[in-house]
Image (tube, helix red, strand yellow):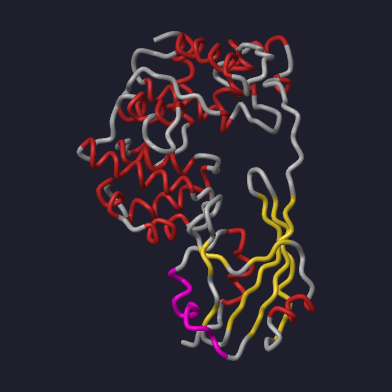
Amino acid sequence: MNHFSEKLLTWYDIHQRQLPWRADPHPYYILVSEFMLQQTRMETVLPYYHRFIEALPTIEQLASASEEQLLKLWEGLGYYRRVKNLHQTAQLIVAEHGGIVPSDPEVLKRFPGIGDYVAGAIASTAYQVKVSAIDGNVLRILSRLYCNEDDLSRAGPKRDLQSKLLALLPTERVGDFNQALMELGALVCLPNARPLCETCPVSADCCAYQTADPLDFPRKKDRRKVPVHLKTVLVVRSEEAVLVEPFGPGLLEGLASFPMKEGHLSPADIKALYPEAIISSLGPARHVFSHLKWDMIGYQVLLAEPEADWTPLSRLDRLSFPTALAVYRSSLEGSVSP
């Protein structure tokens, strides 16, 4: 074991967070956790992970689950394409690999939603395959370790850092080494605050700490302005039922939605659409996605009689709504008679 990995693993053995997929590194558990952790904080993931594994403890059960059940288990976690990719991956593993998660990173990358990082994390953690697992945390650590000033959004600089990381990989405990790097990025080598260099086990090896300012690495990209989309949300309902429409193809495909109109409509605009309704404001709401923002206003549209295809309020809890509509979904709470 090289000196760098020895210091890192000694620190990890003492300071690692106790996580369920570390206590029992079954390939299926690691697969689920890695899909959930994409673009989502650890503390957010944990309750969802426990609920998911309790409901679907094996990859066979995941493969045979309905989309409705999966969306409900994922409700509120966001980035719903992940759970659809996870479902398809499980079905392929059951159909083509007898329910055994493959250990070969190149095979893993053939499945929906699995790229270099997730393939490396699964192969190294579950099977101790000597392969790196480089996510944003690890890139940040490496850029500081080597004072790398390149644009890490480009493939060439990423490959250079990956080559350097491969030279640091130990022959044993490869999975723990990759987990330790990610843990270091989460707990010490912080992204948006002063890193805790005095507590870092490898600060003596770090170029940025020894000769520069770690906050100068990696090089910051110019942030593009996030577009804002104006929306009007209509909770069209009667005393017993509500109009629910599924989202079409795109970001929230398959999730439940209320009717939505582009732009901010006035009460008079809504009255023109529903002349027999009682219109009341549900107020504004905003939601930030990774690449856009929704600036919403909402109205309750109360009609005397529901249409035939409306959803009974008593069945609303069976549907999966995105977090973006949580404030308007909550306007219906308490509407169901016991």
Total count of labels = 0
> In the image, residue 16 lies at what x, y percent?
46, 32
- The residue lying at 68 percent from left, 47 percent from top is 292
Quarter-wise, where is residue 151 in the image?
top right
* Of residues 181 and 83, the one drawn nearer to the viewer in this rendering: 83
**Which residue is farthest left?**
98
| Residue 314 lies in the magenta-colored region | yes
Placement of 287 over or under 265, stated as above or below: above
> In the image, residue 58 lies at what x, y percent?
27, 48
Q: Is residue 252 left or right of residue 260?
A: left
* Of residues 233 and 212, the one drawn nearer to the viewer in this rendering: 233
Placement of 181 over or under 17, stated as above or below: above
* Residue segment shown in magenta: 305-318
- The residue lying at 43 percent from left, 69 percent from top is 318
> In the image, residue 69 lies at what x, y percent?
38, 60
Placement of 39 over or under 287, stated as above or below: above
Q: Is residue 294 left or right of residue 78?
A: right
* Of residues 1 and 78, the one drawn nearer to the viewer in this rendering: 78
Quadrant of the rendering where the N terminus is positioned: top left
- The residue lying at 65 percent from left, 72 percent from top is 234
> In the image, residue 200 lies at what x, y percent?
58, 22
Placement of 100 over or under 107, stated as above or below: below
| Residue 7 lies in the magenta-colored region | no
- The residue lying at 28 percent from left, 39 percent from top is 93
**Which residue is farthest bottom?**
304
